Image (spheres, rainbow, N blue to C red):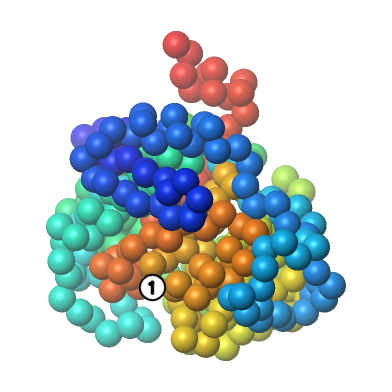
Amino acid sequence: MGSRRYQRAVGNYGPDSGDFRLQVGSVVGAAKSQAGSRGMIGRLRRPAGVGKVLTLPAVTPAVLDFAPMKTPGFTHGFAREVSRSLGRCELLYVPRQEFDLPLARRQHAAYIATLEAAGINITVLPEEPDLPDSSFVEDPAIVLDEVAVICRPGAASRVPEVKSIERALASVRPVRRIVSPGTLEGGDVLRMGKTLYIGMSSRTNLEGIRQCREIIRQHGYEAVGVRLKGCLHLKSAVTSPAEGVLMANADWIDLSPFSHFEVLRVPDAEPWGANTLAINGNVLVTGSSPRTADLLESRGLRVRRLDISELQKAEAALTCLSLLYSVSPQERMVLSPE
């Protein structure tokens, strides 16, 4: 089977509240027409204290003297349908629970519709019935503007996922590979400008980081290793909701490599809230992290709350469910000559 475009869900925006509700079964084109009228979101001014760890109360008014914040822009991406074998997924830091597969698939459809509504062209790869973690497409690869780094997962059960991801990415980027004895998973990689921060986790080893550094340095990037504990991947502990700003769980990560960024700490009651996904003027936050969402909204960012609770049972997060990238207008003409 080949890949296909997703056409099953639509976003419905509340006019003032910033809520984002999804109704599976509608047409994505309606959401795109709404997305086109939204414009750029998230204008605010950075307070003093850049480089310090800050915890802002949810009542902080968005009218504070903030500097404009930018969120990453993406035009395209890949996702993969949820595997029927999801219940056999790899787990490290969460207990195994019973899965409601239809619910997981509905939540996944809503996630894809959210990306589509934000203007991202998503190609949905077909289900891999025998690969439980295969819908977590971020881990087998890292996509930069110049090259795609094909990873070698640290979990043996996930190695077979790589082949189809490499085949898909080869149509949009030159590919380079991490080879044995190196291991590297995309969930351990946080890109900030021309620097890749790479988590030294149970899934990514020093040899994998070394190989990645050699590949990306040819394109002007550098790699910085980051120590973490108590979580699966680096992006379980830290992500960037806006340019120059990090959302972090300081209990899980060594923050010293990030001293020149502004770091917002997740509320104590929401340790998994550090995983956010910034896309085209919006910041996605899981429905299980309402105080984190409030904190980001108080900074003037346009937040979209998204329920992926069934997928979180598989130790999934917002970033791992898609592999996002951008193409230039010239590249788009090549990809879509019509």
From the viewer's side, name the closer residue of 78 and 210.
78
Which residue is located at x 32 percent, y 49 percent? Answer: 22
Residue 248 visible? The answer is no
Tag 1: Cα neighbours inside 10 Å, few (<14), some, or many (≥20)? Answer: some
- Secondary structure found at label 1: loop
* Left or right: residue 167 compared with residue 68: left
Specify the amino acid type for callout 1: Ser
Residue annotated with mark 1: 288
From the viewer's side, name the closer residue of 251 and 133.
251
* Left or right: residue 41 compared with residue 185: right
Which residue is located at x 19 percent, y 60 percent? Answer: 103
Residue 116: horizontal and vertical position, in percent? 41, 39
* Left or right: residue 220 compared with residue 215: right
Which residue is located at x 77 percent, y 61 percent? Answer: 66
Residue 120: horizontal and vertical position, in percent? 47, 38
Quadrant containing the N terminus is top left
Which residue is located at x 47 percent, y 81 percent? Answer: 270
Residue lying furthest top in this view?
Answer: 338
Q: Is residue 42 above or below residue 63?
A: above
Residue 289: horizontal and vertical position, in percent? 44, 73
Residue 201: horizontal and vertical position, in percent? 52, 77
Quadrant containing the C terminus is top left
Q: Is residue 21 above or below residue 26?
A: below
Residue 251 visible? The answer is yes
